[in-house]
Image (spheres, grey):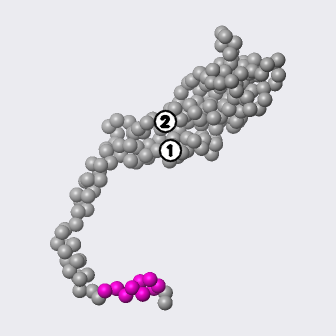
């Protein structure tokens, strides 16, 4: 799969016709179109996909796909961002997914609503590849709790400083409520 694909994957295709032709569909999904994936991550990279259309032994449409994308999301161990590559190969049989992808009777042209939503299909695959608990590789980061505790230890205030501050405030006159409400006047 080349990385400089300029063709944007169409939203929908006539899978029946492409299977007839044994067509290969290659293209990219810009990050702006991957809105469902974006909801799962703090950052999304554009994805690339290669879809090969064929018919299986039973004559049904078979899509063999390859998809590659990437997300950035907080690591669940250290809470720092981690960039993950999402890459897989998959097979999809549209006609097994429901009646809407079955060929219309009498060899009529496939109406637009029966076309295969390939971009959604690619995004589905990317969503499946998102790990439940995204993390840096094991051993490459420390749990955030340990870091927080260390920071708290270093930043802990001397209790006598706090007492001194309290004593000072006690001697101040009470703040004027009118002035506090509207400092401009
Ligand atoms: Zn981490």
- Does the image show residue 30? yes
- Residue 180 inside the magenta-drawn segment: yes
| Identity of the residue drawn at 23% across and 83% down | 170
Q: Is residue 19 left or right of residue 149?
A: right
Where residue 10 appears, x then y in whole percent? 71, 35
Which disc, if any, is residue 31? none
> What secondary structure is marked by label 1?
loop
Residue 95 found in image quarter:
top right
Q: CA distance from mark 1 to mark 2?
A: 9 Å
Which residue matches tag 2?
130
Q: Residue drawn at (52%, 32%), measured in percent from left and top?
A: 128
**Is 112 in the magenta?**
no
For marks 1 and 2 on the same chain, the one whose residue lies earlier in the sequence? 1
The residue to which callout 1 is attached is: 41
Q: Nearer the viewer, residue 119 or 60?
A: 60
Q: Residue 108: horizontal and vertical position, in percent?
A: 82, 22
Based on the displayed image, in which of its 4 quarters is residue 180 positioned? bottom left
Front residue of 176 and 142? 176
x and y percentages locating residue 7 in the rendered image: 70, 36
Which residue is situated farthest in the bottom direction here? 185
- The number of callouts visible is 2
Q: Which span is picked out in magenta?
A: 174-183
Q: Residues within 10 Å of mark 2 (few under 14, many from 20)?
A: some
Asked whether residue 52 appears in the rendered view, the answer is: no
The quarter of the picture where the N terminus appears is top right
Q: Is residue 65 above or below residue 181?
A: above
Q: Residue at x 49, y 90 (%)?
A: 185
Q: Using the image, determine if residue 138 lies above or below residue 181.
A: above
- Residues tagged 1 and 2 counted as in contact (Cβ below 8 A): yes
Indicate yes or no: mark 1 CB to ligand 1 under 8 Å: no
Identify which residue is drawn at 50% across, 47% down.
42
Q: Secondary structure at mark 2?
A: loop
């Amino acid at each position: 799969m080349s990385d400089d694909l300029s063709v944007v994957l169409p939203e929908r295709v006539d899978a029946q016709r492409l299977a007839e032709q044994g067509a290969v569909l290659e293209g990219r999904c810009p990050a702006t179109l991957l809105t469902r994936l974006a909801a799962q991550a703090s950052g999304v990279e554009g994805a690339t996909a290669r879809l090969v259309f064929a018919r299986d032994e039973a004559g049904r449409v078979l899509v063999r796909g390859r998809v590659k994308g990437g997300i950035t999301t907080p690591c669940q161990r250290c809470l720092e961002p981690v960039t993950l590559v999402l890459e897989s190969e998959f097979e999809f049989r549209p006609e097994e997914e429901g009646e809407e992808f079955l060929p219309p009777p009498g060899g009529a042209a496939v109406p637009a609503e029966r076309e295969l939503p390939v971009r959604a299909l690619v995004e589905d695959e990317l969503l499946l590849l998102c790990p439940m608990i995204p993390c840096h590789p094991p051993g490459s980061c420390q749990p955030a709790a340990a870091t927080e505790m260390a920071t708290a230890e270093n930043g802990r205030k001397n209790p006598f400083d706090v007492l001194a501050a309290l004593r000072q405030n006690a001697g101040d006159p009470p703040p004027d409520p009118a002035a506090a409400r509207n400092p401009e006047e």
